Image (spheres, rainbow, N blue to C red):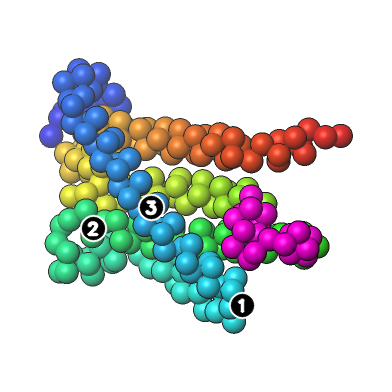
Amino acid sequence: MPAQSNNPLIRWDWVFNEWDQIWAALVEHMELTFYAMTLGLALSIPLAAMALRYRVTAAPITAFTGFLYTLPSVALFGLLVPFFGLSRLTAVIPLAGYTLLVLVTNIIAGFRSVSAPVRTAADAMGLTPPRRVLGVELPLATPYIITGIRIATVSTVGLVTVAAIIGQGGLGSLILDGLKRSFWTPMVVGAVLSILLALVLDLLILWLGRKATPWTQRRAATP
């Protein structure tokens, strides 16, 4: 354990010497976030589609995703370890589960924001239901969906750090290592990089969302 007098918040010599370890942790953090978000979207899209198609299922689906969101992450990791071991899959499944509530509710809200006259006009133009959904409703719902992706991504970046308890924590492994040794530098580096990663991903998704929906910017600029 480093002596207290030699334990500043940042020891730059440690950062330079352990840069390979820090970079590997950052890459692992990004990979876990990407896998969790990809799986979360793959699950939330059909769930939201079912809730939109059969309104009676909307309440049970949102209740189920809300229930998943309330479960302690450590408990979920512990339940999955006997089945999948200390693997990446054990980390990704709970992380994806925590994204469902935000993603499903925002997808539903986005499509429900499309007014009935817009749907009627699309039908009058002879658009088939699939073409109406993809060509009219989806673009109008995109801002809501982007907002859900931003919130879910930032939340996932924070939750990934907890996965360090099963050896799959990315930057959380630095924080855990610092806690074990009462060594501030790994803790600070892991925490700061987690915050910066969340901010960068949030801004990136916001930028991509604006590029994908240029009409919203023109409408906002209209006096």
Amino acid under label 3?
Thr
Q: Position of residue 129 (x, y in %)?
A: 63, 66
* Quadrant placement of the N terminus: top left
- Marks 3,1: beta carbons within 8 A: no
C-alpha distance separating marks 2 and 3: 13 Å
* Quadrant placement of the C terminus: top right
The mark found on residue 115 in the picture is none
Could you classify mark 2 by the number of other residues whose Cα lies within 10 Å: few (under 14), some (14-19), or many (20 or more)? some
Q: Residue furthest right?
A: 223
Q: Position of residue 41 (x, y in %)?
A: 44, 57
Q: Secondary structure at mark 3?
A: helix
- Residue 53 vs 191, above or below: the answer is below
Instruction: Verify whether residue 86 appears in magenta.
Output: no
C-alpha distance separating marks 1 and 2: 32 Å
When asked about the image quadrant of residue 84, the answer is bottom left
Q: Which residues are magenta?
A: 119-139
Residue at 57 percent across and 52 percent down: it is 145
> Considering depth in this image, is 153 or 178 the residue closer to the camera?
153
* Residue that numbered label 3 is attached to: 38
Residue at 77 percent across and 39 percent down: it is 219
* Residue that numbered label 1 is attached to: 55
Q: Is residue 197 visible?
A: yes
Amino acid under label 2?
Leu
Q: Position of residue 47 (x, y in %)?
A: 48, 69
The mark found on residue 89 in the picture is 2
